[in-house]
Image (cartoon, rainbow, N blue to C red):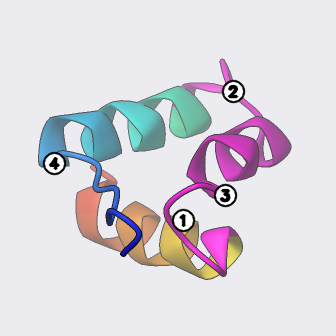
Amino acid sequence: MKEQKTISIAERRWLVRELEAGRMTIGEAKERLLEISKDPYALLQIWRKRYCS
């Protein structure tokens, strides 16, 4: 059985802050999320709505 990887809320917020500040591109963020999601772009969109200030 394959272990499910997760990312903490703090890491999610950090990732959104990095994207919003321009220190990370969408492509770089998607690479980080490929291990935990089949659709990292959709996951990023959800997180940006939820954690963007």
Q: Residue furthest right?
A: 27
On screen, residue 48 above or below 23: below
Question: Sequence order check: which comes first, mark 4 or mark 3?
Answer: 4
Q: Is residue 50 magenta?
A: no
Give the percent coordinates (x, y) of residue 39.
66, 80
Task: Say which of 12 and 7 sits in front.
Answer: 7
Q: Amino acid at mark 4?
A: Ile
Q: Amino acid at mark 2?
A: Met
Residue name at image x 76 percent, y 36 percent: 28
User: Which of the 4 image quadrants contains residue 1?
Assistant: bottom left
| Residue occupied by mark 3 | 34
Give the percent coordinates (x, y) of residue 4.
32, 66
Tell me the crowding category of disc 3: few under 14, some 14 to 19, or many 20 or more residues within 10 angstroms, Cα based: few
Label 4 element class: helix
Left or right, residue 8 beside residue 47? left
Question: Sequence order check: which comes first, mark 3 or mark 1?
Answer: 3
| Residue occupied by mark 2 | 24
| Distance Cα–Cα, label 4 vs label 2 | 18 Å
Label 1 element class: helix
| Distance Cα–Cα, label 4 vs label 3 | 17 Å
Tell me the crowding category of disc 4: few under 14, some 14 to 19, or many 20 or more residues within 10 angstroms, Cα based: few
Circles 4, 3 touching at the beta carbon (< 8 Å): no
| Residue occupied by mark 4 | 9
Query: Depth-wise, is mark 3 or mark 2 nearer the camera?
Result: 3
Tell me the crowding category of disc 1: few under 14, some 14 to 19, or many 20 or more residues within 10 angstroms, Cα based: some
User: Which of the 4 image quadrants contains residue 48?
Assistant: bottom left
User: Which of the 4 image quadrants contains residue 15?
Assistant: top left
Residue name at image x 68 percent, y 72 percent: 41
Q: In the rendered structure, which segment of residues is drawn in magenta?
A: 21-40
Q: Amino acid at mark 1?
A: Leu
Q: Amino acid at mark 3?
A: Leu
| Residue occupied by mark 1 | 44
